[in-house]
Amino acid sequence: MLLQAFADQFCSVSLPRQLVIKNVRLGVLFKLLQAIILFALITICVNGQVWSRPSSAEAFGFSIWSEGLQPGADQQSDAAHCRAAQAYHFSVSDMWHYAPTGCISLPAEEASIKTGSAGEVFITTMVRETDIWRSLGEGCGASARQSCESAKLRGKYVASEGGCSCEMHEEYFAQDAEEQVVRLYHGYQVDTTNGRAGYFMRGSSASKVAREGPPGQMQERNSHLTTIFRKTDGSECQVGGKSEWSSQDSLNGISGTLRELLACADL
C-alpha cells in the first residue's frame, strides 16, 4: 500500500484538464477582477516602496556654542525671576536650600562655557557663590565678627587660635541668561549597508554639498538641506525670527536665543 502511494506520487505524470466557459458577462467580470487585483498590488508596492531598503539616519557634525547676549538684552532686567527672586526659593533638604536674591550680570567668560564636546555648551542660569576671607591677630575680634554677620554679608564667623575666618554665601540668577545667543551647525549620516560601514550618505547645514560613497571615496553632489524647527506637538516655532532655515541661510550657522530654543522645546 505504501509502495503504491509512493508510485502514485513520484512515478506518475498528471495532465491538466481545461474547461472553457464562453460567456461574455462572466469573461468581462473575470478580467475586471484581475485588473482590480493588479492595481491593488501595484498601489501596495508603490506606497510601501518595496524596491527600497530603509536606513536610519544619525546625527553627524553637530556643533553648538554661545555668542553672548542679544544686543540690548542687558537692559532687560525686569524679568519675573529678577523682580521676585524669593518666589524661587527651594529646599531639597535641611542641608540643601536655594535662596537666590535677584539677578546679577555676569562677565562673558562666566555666562557661558564651551565644554570639551563640540555638541555641548553650558549656559549659566543660577550661581551659588562662596567667598571666604581669613585674618590673623588684630584683624580678628568683635568688629570682624560684627562685619561678617551683618545683614549685608550674612556670613558665618569662625574664630580659631590666633586667627579667624568669615564664610559668605550668595545665590543669584544670571541676568538675561535667556537672551544668550546660541549658534549651531547640524548634519546627518546614513549607513546604507546595515552597519557594515560600506557606503555612507552625509550632509550638513554648513554646506551646500552632500557626500556619498564608500569611506575614502566619497563623491560630492549638490544639496539643499532645509532646517525646520517644530515644537513637540509638530507645530512650527521660530528660532532667530523664523521657523525655516534654507541651506543658504544656515551656511554661517543657525542662531537664536536660548529663550527661543526653550520655547520650541515647550520649556
Image: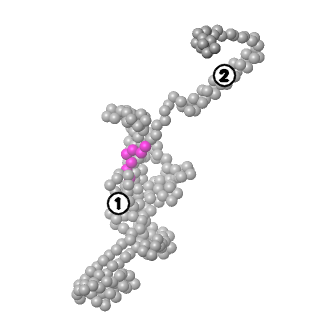
Q: Disc 1 vs disc 2: which is toward the camera?
A: 2
Q: Is residue 164 left or right of residue 198?
A: left
Numbered range of the magenta stretch: 58-64
- In the image as oriented, which residue stretches furthest toward the front? 1
The percent position of residue 182, horizontal first and vertical second, equals 40, 56
Q: Residues within 10 Å of mark 2 (few under 14, many from 20)?
A: few
Please indicate, yes or no, whether residue 185 appears anywhere in the rendered image: yes
- 81 relative to 202 in the view: left or right: right
Q: Could you tell me which residue is drawn at 31 percent across and 90 percent down?
A: 142
Closer to the camera in the image, 135 or 74: 135
Q: Position of residue 118 (x, y in %)?
A: 35, 51
Write down the residue under mark 1. Answer: 113
The N terminus - image quarter: top right
Which image quarter: residue 138?
bottom left
Outermost residue, bottom direction? 142
Query: At numbered mark 2, what does the secondary structure look like: helix, strand or loop?
Result: helix
Residue drawn at point x = 31 percent, y = 34 percent: 216
- Above or below, 243 against 143 in this view is above
Q: Is residue 201 magenta?
A: no
Which residue is painted at 60% across and 30% down in the image? 44
Q: 189 or 80: nearer the eye?
A: 189
Which quarter of the picture shows residue 111? bottom left
> Of the residues shown, which amino acid type is indicated by label 2?
Ala
The answer to the question of whether label 1 and label 2 lie on touching residues, with beta carbons closer than 8 A, is no
Secondary structure of the residue carrying tag 1 is strand
Q: Give the CA distance from mark 1 to mark 2.
A: 66 Å
Judge from the rendering whether residue 15 lies leftward or rightward of residue 183; answer left or right: right
Give the residue pinned by disc 2.
35
